[in-house]
Amino acid sequence: MGYRVVVAGATGNVGREMLNILAEREFPIDEIVALASARSQGDVIDFGETEKTLKVQNIEHFDWTGWDIALFAIGSEATKKYAPIAAAAGCVVIDNSSLYRMDPDVPLIVPEVNPHAIDGYKKRNIIANPNCSTAQMVVALKPLHDAAKILRVVVSTYQSVSGAGKEGMDELFEQSRNIFVGDSAEAKKFTKQIAFNVIPHIDSFLDDGSTKEEWKMVVETKKILDPKIKITATCVRVPVFVGHSESINIEFENELSAKKAQSILREAPGIMLVDKREDGGYITPIECVGDYATFISRVREDSTVDNGINLWCVSDNLRKGAALNAVQIAELLGRRHLKKG
């Protein structure tokens, strides 16, 4: 027996990836429905690479009764309206927005890192998916934290435009094309030109000078991994279509050599270590697109602090950073709580 599954926001970048991954991983489904706003009602979309297609239904008129799991990729405002309705009807919501991440009654889950925390989902019938940059970072940090206890993390991100949705991807494409033909590269989605440029600004600014994206990485990592870890982040948008990269500096309580860190990461779940100290012996964003893994390269010791390690972390932000993690949460939920048959 399988589950009755809803994908809300099925016409967006993340929603389409959710459908692809559900099909790729052969998630046990008896029935599946694709939901979106009224403007997409009646559209036909593919269910992964299967021959099956789905006709998009209007989320506003949807009856949630009898559905088991809903994967939400509809943004915070729509989630605020529809998630409580779905949850009250008995459908477990796995939400990709930031709305519920810091709610103490909503578990924030990365299955490779804190699977046990999912047991608290019954308080609200809602489970939160972390920020894309947080998700890949904690996958890398978890096995190292278990081995040597992390004290402090300094992370700089290089985040692709797909993190800003279709509008962000379109803007990079249009600006790049316009520059090549001598036209203006007007910024609309982003605060400055993104083509052939980098922008040290993602989300809104906070009173302390950090951005909300940077704040998310700090507080979400503490909630998922360990509240005692000190974290500082600088989040940067770069002219890459898909794939987030991170330069991570980690300070440990206990001694950890680069060789030992490599050995730990090589065996850790969800991680692919590609770390040859030669030309091309590392992974870049373009190579991780479409892959499930979080890739780690450039593992080396930081001689400026006691017990310090530097590493390079790359992942497909539409997959591990969003859709894949949501499906993994659904799989974990099924194994621990919603067993069929």
Image (cartoon, rainbow, N blue to C red):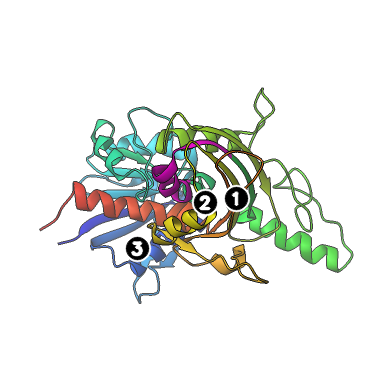
Q: Residue furthest top?
A: 207
| Residue nearest the viewer, comparing 242 with 29 | 242
The mark that comes first in sequence, 3 or 2, is: 3
For mark 3, give the secondary structure: helix
Q: Which mark is residue 301?
A: 1
- What is the quadrant of residue 10 in the picture? bottom left
| Residue nearest the viewer, comparing 17 with 282 | 282
For mark 2, give the secondary structure: loop
The mark that comes first in sequence, 2 or 1, is: 2
Residue 228 lies, with reference to residue 174, above or below; the image says: above
At a point 77% along the width and 57% down the height, the residue shown is: 195
Could you give the CA–CA distance between mark 2 and mark 1, rounded to whole angstroms?
7 Å
Residue 284, how many percent across, how many down?
A: 62, 64
Tell us which disc is closer to us: 3 or 1: 1
Residue 318, how many percent across, how many down?
A: 51, 57
The magenta-colored residue range is 138-153
Residue 203, how many percent across, how many down?
A: 63, 38
Q: Which residue is mark 2?
A: 257
Q: Amino acid at mark 3?
A: Leu
Q: Is residue 253 left or right of residue 245?
A: left
Could you give the CA–CA distance between mark 3 and mark 2, rounded to whole angstroms?
39 Å
Evaluate whether residue 172 shows in this view: yes
